[in-house]
Amino acid sequence: MDKILVHGGVRLEGAVRIGGSKNSALPILAATLLTKGKCVIDRVPDLSDIHYMLTILGRLGCEVERASGVVQIRAEKILTEAPYEIVRKMRASVCVLGPLLGREKAAKVSLPGGCVIGDRPIDLHLKGFEALGATVMVKGGDILLEAKKLQGARINLRGRHGPTVLGTGNIMMASVLAEGTTDIEGAAEEPEVIDLANFLIAMGAKISGAGTQHIQIEGVPELHGANHTVIPDRIEAGTFLVAGAIAGNRVTVTRTEPKHLGAVITALKNAGFELSHTSDSVTISPNGSRRPLHIETLPYPGFPTDMQAQFCAMLATMDGTSVVTETVFPQRFMHVSELKRMGASIDLNNHRATIHGVERLSGAPVMASDLRASAALVLAALPADGITEINRVYHIDRGYEAIDEKLNALGAHIERVKS
Ligand code: EPZ
C-alpha cells in the first residue's frame, strides 16, 4: 500500500484547477444504463471510485471507452446483477439499482457494507422502489428488486438525518421510465442531484424541481443517448481552499462553481480569511485576524459534511475554542484521533468535537481512514513541524485526483512512496 510523506513548514501560493465532481459523475455514469443509445460524459475525474463504477458497468454488459476525462458508454444489452467482488469496494455502487430497475424491472446488487463514517443504510432507497411497485427482497447479502411494471407514486425521502443524496438520484432514475408521474418530497437539494437531473433531461426525461425538496418526474416510454459535462467538484475545491487557509499565502481554485461553495466560503470568512471570486474561481488569502468557529454540518445548502474533517484540521491551530457538530454522519470523526497524534487538543462527545487551538501541530505517522479524513491529515501536515507519514493512501485516491502533485505545484513538499 502506498504512503505519502508530507514535509511540514511550507507556505502555499498559486492556482489549482478543479476536476469534475466524483459525486456527480458516479450516478450520471450509472444513469447511462437507462438507454441503448451512446452517451458521452466529459470531465469525469480519474479516481479509483470512478474506475470501480466503469468496471461494474462493463460487467453489466456496457461498452465502455475512456480517453483522458471523456467516457463513452453504450448499454445495448445489459445484465441486471452487479458483481459482489467490485460492489463491496464502493458503497456508491447502490446507484445502479435505480437505472437497472427502471430499464429492466429487475436488479440484484449486494447490500453495501457500512464504512468508517458510520452505518450506511439504504432503507429510504428501498422504500422508494417499493412505492413505485417493485418487490424488494434481501437474500444472502444481496438486494433483489423485481417489478412487473413501475407506476409513478408520491414518495417522501426524508430520513432522520435529513434527505438522501444517492437515494434521491436512485428514485429519479427508477421513475423516469415508469408509467405516470412521481412526486419526490424531502428530496436532496445538492448540486449533484441537479446535475444528474440535467443529464436525464438531456436523455429525454421529463423532470422538474431538481435542486428543491420537491422533484416531479413524468414517466416517458424510452430515453436516448446524450452528451454531458460533469459539474466541478465542490468538495475538492473546498479542500484546496482550506489548504490555503491552513498554509497559504494566496491560493486560487479555478474551473470551479463559486455558488456551490456558499456555506464553505461563509465559514472561511467567519474564521477571518479574505475571500474573493470570479465567475469560475475563488481566491483565499490570510488577512491577519483568525477566529475560532462553531460549525454544524447540514444537508445542502448547509455546511457540507464532506468538508467537516478538513475544517477540523484548520481549527486545530486556530486560537480559541471551536465546536464542530456533525448531524449527517454522527460518527464521522475518524480524523480526530489521528489529529491528536499530531498534537491537536480535541474533546469528542458523541457527534460534537470541541477543538482547543494549539500553536502548531507536529508531524507523526498517521493512518488514513475515509477519503475526507485522509485529506484532512494531509492539510494538517502542511504547516506542521517535521514529516508526517500517511499510510493507506488509497483512501485519498478514491476521491482526489493527484492531490499530492496539485499541492506540490502550490509549494508543498509531498513524496509518494510506492509500497
Ligand atoms: C452522498 O452519500 C455522498 N456520496 C457522500 O459523500 C456525502 O457525504 C453524502 O451524500 C451526504 O452529503 C456520493 O454522492 C457518492 P445520504 P449518500 O444518503 O447519498 C442516512 C464523500 O466523501 N440515510 O445523503 O450515501 C445516512 O445514513 C462521500 O464523497 C438513511 O438513513 O448519503 C446519512 O446519515 C461520503 N437511509 C444521511 O441519511 C437511507 O436510505 C445522508 O446520507 C439513506 C441515507
Image (cartoon, rainbow, N blue to C red):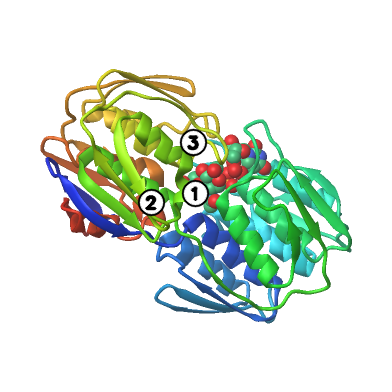
Q: Residue at x 73, y 72 (%)?
A: 204
* Viewer-closest of 223 and 414: 223
Q: Are marks 1 and 2 in contact (CB under 8 Å)?
A: yes
Q: Nearer the viewer, mark 1 or mark 2?
A: 1
Q: Is residue 20 visible?
A: yes
Q: Give percent across and percent down for residue 251.
A: 25, 49
Q: Is residue 337 above or below residue 211?
A: above
Q: At numbered mark 3, what does the secondary structure look like: helix, strand or loop?
A: loop
Which residue lies at the image location 70% right of the left edge and 75% below the top edge? 35
Q: Where is the N terminus found, in terms of image quarters?
A: bottom left
Task: Judge left or right: residue 208 versus residue 49.
Answer: right
Which amino acid type is shown beneath numbered disc 2?
Ala
* Residue hosting label 3: 303
- For marks 1 and 2, the one nearer the N-term is 2
**Hey, what amino acid is under mark 3?**
Phe
Q: Secondary structure at mark 1?
A: helix
Mark yes or no: residue 113 visible: no
Q: CA distance from mark 1 to mark 2?
A: 10 Å
- Mark 2 sits on what residue? 237
* Quadrant position of residue 27: bottom right
Badge 2 density bin: few <14, some 14–19, many ≥20, Cα 10 Å: many
Look at mark 1 in the image and give the residue it sits on.
260
The quarter of the picture where the C terminus appears is bottom left
- Vertical order, 208 against 269 (above or below): below
Name the kind of residue labelled 1 in the image. His
Whether residue 303 is situated above or below residue 83 in the rendered picture: above
